[in-house]
Image (spheres, rainbow, N blue to C red):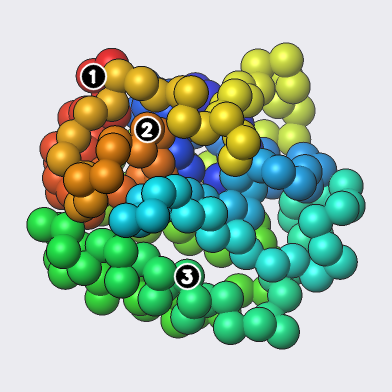
């Protein structure tokens, strides 16, 4: 079992660890922290890495428990994120295969960040055809906090992690290390992406 935080379509180094376990418990009560992947992901573009952030009510400078964090809808972030993904991955070999179900994910309106992040985890598991069991800390109220695994990848250092991952990205402008799981999924398809993140 691995006990860890929820990430927004986490980096490959994050999924590498998840793929080593049959049982994943996500901490839904940890405090929100800015400059983390709890509400941010990185996609590859022709201009380099692009950070996409989910706006939250109250701003990012807060330590509110994750299960109380609400998504802000005073901007069109959902359509902006899906458009950025579509524009930059429309030429990826497997993008069209996943586009409709991914759009459905963004079409739903979740009040709380945790609920959306859990939905992205279930979607990603399904596309990867992974077998791991997903649960939350609510089911494990007495879990030992010392067993919690924290991904060392941050928005300001993510490219220093996951250097073993190499595959054909959409743009020939230099390989972007440790991008979000969508990058590998659209490039290789779920089965091959899962094989890659499991094997290093």
In front here: 112 or 40?
40
Residue at (32, 56) in percent of width and height: 46
In front here: 51 or 126?
51
Can you tell which quarter of the image residue 23 is in? top left
Can you tell which quarter of the image residue 173 is in? top left
Q: Secondary structure at mark 1?
A: helix
Q: Eyeballing the image, is 76 above or below 84? A: below
Residue to which mark 3 is pinned: 81
**What crowding class fits label 1: few (fewer than 14 Cα within 10 Å), some (14-19), or many (20 or more)?**
few
Residue to which mark 2 is pinned: 177
Disc tally is: 3
Can you tell which quarter of the image residue 109 is in? bottom right
Q: Secondary structure at mark 3?
A: helix
> Is residue 139 something one can see in this rendering?
no
Q: Are marks 3 and 2 in contact (CB under 8 Å)?
A: no
- Mark in the foreground, 3 or 2: 2
Residue at (75, 51) in percent of width and height: 66
Nearest to N terminus: mark 3 or mark 1: 3
Residue to which mark 1 is pinned: 199
**What crowding class fits label 3: few (fewer than 14 Cα within 10 Å), some (14-19), or many (20 or more)?**
some
Nearest to N terminus: mark 3 or mark 2: 3
| Image position, residue 111 (x, y; %) | 68, 74
Q: Secondary structure at mark 2?
A: loop
- Mark in the foreground, 1 or 2: 2
Residue at (38, 55) in percent of width and height: 47
Q: Eyeballing the image, is 184 above or below 198? A: below
Nearest to N terminus: mark 1 or mark 2: 2
**What crowding class fits label 2: few (fewer than 14 Cα within 10 Å), some (14-19), or many (20 or more)?**
many
């Amino acid at each position: 079992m691995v006990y860890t935080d929820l990430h927004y379509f986490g980096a490959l180094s994050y999924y590498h660890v998840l793929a080593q376990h049959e049982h994943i418990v996500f901490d839904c009560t940890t405090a929100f922290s800015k400059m983390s992947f709890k509400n941010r992901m990185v996609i590859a573009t022709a201009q380099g890495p692009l950070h996409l952030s989910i706006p939250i009510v109250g701003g990012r400078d807060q330590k509110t428990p994750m299960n109380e964090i609400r998504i802000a809808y005073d901007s069109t972030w959902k359509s902006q994120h899906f458009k950025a993904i579509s524009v930059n991955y429309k030429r990826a070999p497997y993008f069209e295969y996943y586009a409709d179900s991914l759009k459905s994910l963004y079409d739903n309106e979740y009040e709380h960040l945790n609920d959306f992040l859990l939905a992205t985890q279930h979607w990603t598991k399904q596309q990867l055809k992974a077998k791991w069991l997903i649960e939350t800390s609510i089911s494990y109220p007495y879990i030992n906090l010392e067993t919690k695994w924290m991904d060392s990848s941050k928005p300001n250092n993510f490219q220093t992690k996951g250097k073993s991952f190499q595959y054909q990205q959409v743009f020939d402008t230099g390989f972007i290390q440790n991008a979000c799981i969508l990058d590998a999924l659209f490039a290789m398809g779920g089965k091959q992406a899962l094989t890659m993140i499991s094997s290093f």
